[in-house]
Image: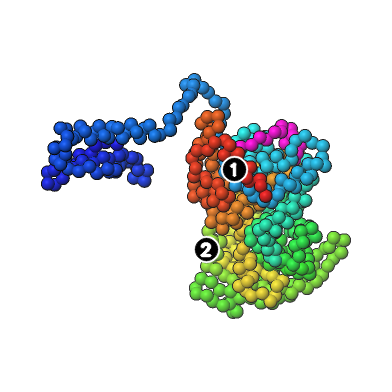
Amino acid sequence: MYLKKSTRKNGRVYLSIADGYHDPKKGYSRTVNINKIGYLDTFLDQYDDPIAHFEEVVAQMNLEKKASKPQQSYDYDPDETFDGDNSKNLGYAALSYIYHELEIDTFFNSRQRSIAAEYNLNSIMRLLVFSRLLYPGSKKNNFENRSKFFERFDFTLDDLYRSLTRFSKFREALQLWIHEHVTSGYGRDTTITYYDVTNYYFEIDKQDKTRRKGVCKEHRPNPIVQMGLFMDNSGLPVAYQLFPGNNNDCTTLIPILQRIRREFGVGKAVVVSDKGLNTAKNAYYLANSRGGYVFSQSVRGGTKELKEYVLKTSGYEQFGDDYKKKSRQFTRKVEFEDESGNIVKADIAEKQVIFYSRDYDRRAKADRAAAVTKAKSLIVNPDKFNKYNSYGAAKYIKHIEFDEETGEIIKAKSVIAFDEEKLAEDEKYDGYYVIVTSKCKATDEWVIDTYKELWRIEETFKVTKSDLEARPVYVSRDDHIESHFLTCFVALVIIRLLQKKLGGRYSSEKILSGLSKTCCTNTDANRYVANYNDEAVIEIGKLFGIDFRKKNRTLAEIKNIIAKTKIK
């Protein structure tokens, strides 16, 4: 505080007591009058030197103000050192709440009693799941970074690897447990389910029983495993299953669907999937069981009759210049070999919905442009290409063959010339989309809108591969591979439930990035200073009663926050 002397327009000096402070919004220091005294000339009769008098008053006020503040002493050793990272993560408290809402700790603690193991299964699963969400890496890396969390993980690296063998035996039981808790705690709508298949590669060359070379969605030559995943109508994962990498996508649907119908009680469900699952056997099974199907249908790979119907202008209902649609009832004739080796021939009543979108047309041409450019480059420089890096472009070469062993182009058997006819044929169907369903009485709008929601499961796979970094996989034994994907599945359920609690306002990337940065730095033995928050983190904190805006906390306060996440 200080004595402020202001000369007014009338020439008189006005005295007041002012105080200075830093305005964080303005970014500079400001002053505020805290006590008005009056005009200087009115005090000349009272004091020989009014200014000196009031400056003494201000000095006394400053002494009293200083005395009223609690004194802090900072005892430190200027030569003191510390090892490693001096911060710990507090953001995982939000994830811990959901982990315990699902009672995953109860699941493992109940099974702990039946096994002879000194290590704690629940403790190891918590570390693996939280690390997968916030700091994805190898199992060894997860173990080495365990000190980033505010609790003791009292087990060895060998214990962690031993637990993977245990976890693999519980994979189906844990999926069912989580399904039941999601159903009771959050609500589960399985009247419509979405199914898709993706694969995950391994940084190895040699194949084994599970890791097999197949059609890799990332066009890599490495051995892969296939994962089939079911998702409910609100975007929450239901169940998954792993298959050898050389399995065709279409063969994975029925085994996992039979399991979740038998064990999960998922009854009358319409299964929605893309054209890769649209086979005669799958369609027949779904059409003749509870529920039904909604599949996309390839136009270019369809029958001559379907292509003619799609391109025929009659029957379309036009919506402006950019969109049109039509539909028809159709009898689909199927033929396939059943599990006993018998040939099954049958008719399926099906509805076909065809629509054209100018946006889809433009997108198809834009997506193809890279393949066309690569094909033309391949013609000029064939030595630079092989089976793997020419994906998508080779079909626009009139005739090209690859060596099965090396993947190199066999020049003696290849005609290196651009196929203009193939390009023109593909372009004819740009913008057209066909969706087929066994729900023949459904409206066109319902069929189209239901299928469009399939993007959710495609986006879910992107989350596992990018945010959760589920691949490449750094374990090799089959049971460890199963456990790796089990922890990924648990992590996926937790982040999806957190997104649901937040009303879908934030992406998984935004949430996990924020929570991973929500750390506290240790300033002395029992005090921590927070060093990050953002809009999403603050809103997450409000959900669970954690004020992530608070800067200073004692270790006891933090331990209390973590303890509350485990109270059901």
Circle 2: element type: helix
Q: Earlier in the sequence, mark 2 or mark 1?
A: 2
- Helix, strand or loop status at disc 1: helix
Q: Is residue 305 left or right of residue 515?
A: right
Residue span colored magenta: 150-164
What percent of the width, then of the height, locates residue 57?
26, 34
Residue 326 image point, x, y percent = 61, 76
User: Which residue sits at x=72%, y=66%?
Assistant: 269
For residue 13, what is the image quadrant?
top left
What residue do we see at 78% from left, 73% from top? 347
State the residue at coordinates (82%, 37%): 116
Residue 482 horizontal side relative to residue 392, left or right? right
Q: Is residue 400 visible?
A: yes
Q: Are marks 2 and 1 in contact (CB under 8 Å)?
A: no
Please tell me in which quadrant of the rendered image residue 295 appears: bottom right
Q: Is residue 170 left or right of residue 419?
A: right
Q: Amino acid at mark 1?
A: Ile
The answer to which of 118 and 268 lies nearer the viewer is 118
* Viewer can see residue 381: no
Q: Give the CA separation, mark 2 to mark 1.
A: 52 Å
345 or 309: nearer the viewer: 345
Q: Residue 280 placed where, x, y %?
A: 76, 66
Q: Badge 1: how crowded within 10 Å, few (<14), some, or many (20+)?
A: some
Residue that carries the numbered disc 2 in the rendered image: 362
Q: Where does the N terminus fall, quadrant-wise?
A: top left
Q: What residue is pinned by disc 1?
A: 561
Q: How is the image coloured?
A: rainbow
